[in-house]
Image (cartoon, rainbow, N blue to C red):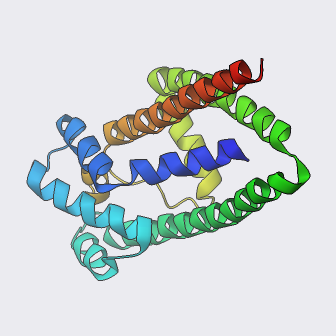
Amino acid sequence: MIFVCVIICAVYFVTTPFASNSMVVLSQRDTMLPLHERSGIASVTTQYVRNGSYADEIVGQYLQDKVSGDESVQHLYDVRAVFVQLWNVARVLLVILVLLLTSSFWFKWGRWIRLSTRMASWMCLVLPVLVGFIVLVAFGPLFHLFHKILFPQGNWQFPSDSLLIQVFPQLFWVVSALFLLAFILIVGVLFRLLTLKSSESKS
């Protein structure tokens, strides 16, 4: 459960304006759009899928695309729906974690919390390294698998000259994945230091 919370926090971080703008800049060589134009569209799109704002703006932007305008807008609706479900899961997990932490004062669940944190720390350290290796050597198949799971309706493939792909080319998603994995890895290091310090204080 703690590891799932870390993943959700990583997604939240990757979709912040700072991280999103950084990924746009780092992936600029993979697109024909000017940076200022692409950055503006990416910012509005990211904020829409993240919190539902700028809905009219994203429809207006992508409907102008004669290559895949309607399909792009529908896909963004689907992505927004995934984010809504993700934030709902985050709220439920947050309530559960708060209840567990507060009740641990009465039920003495400190040992269980330490064990869960230790397990989460190892998962945060090991899985990003494994997934990061896959991202670097076989990003295409991983990207396809990810989309087939989240978007079984199949409307997630677009021509390379469509606006959606020009704003978010493959390199953007490679950088996004590396940002997300780096966030999880850093949290894993912090968790590991926390559990080691806790073990030392007990001994």
Q: Image height check: is 59 above or below 159?
A: below
Determine the residue located farthest toward the bottom in the rendered image. 56
Q: Image height check: is 98 above or below 62?
A: above
Seen from the viewer's position, the closer of residues 153 and 87 is: 87
Q: Quadrant of the C terminus?
A: top right
Residue 137: percent from the left, percent from the top?
48, 20
Specify whether residue 160 is in view: no
Quarter occupied by residue 40: bottom left
Residue 144: percent from the left, percent from the top?
54, 42
Left or right: 61 as drawn, with respect to 200: left
Rendered residue at 23%/36% (across/down): 26
Residue 184: percent from the left, percent from the top?
53, 35
Rendered residue at 49%/28% (across/down): 135
Quarter occupied by residue 152: bottom right
Seen from the viewer's position, the closer of residues 159 and 92 is: 92
- Mark count: 0
Left or right: 78 as drawn, with respect to 96: left
Rendered residue at 42%/65% (across/down): 50
Rendered residue at 19%/41% (across/down): 25
Left or right: 99 as drawn, with respect to 48: right
Determine the residue located farthest toward the right in the rendered image. 107
Specify whether residue 97 is in view: yes
Residue 181: percent from the left, percent from the top?
49, 33
Seen from the viewer's position, the closer of residues 23 and 6 is: 6
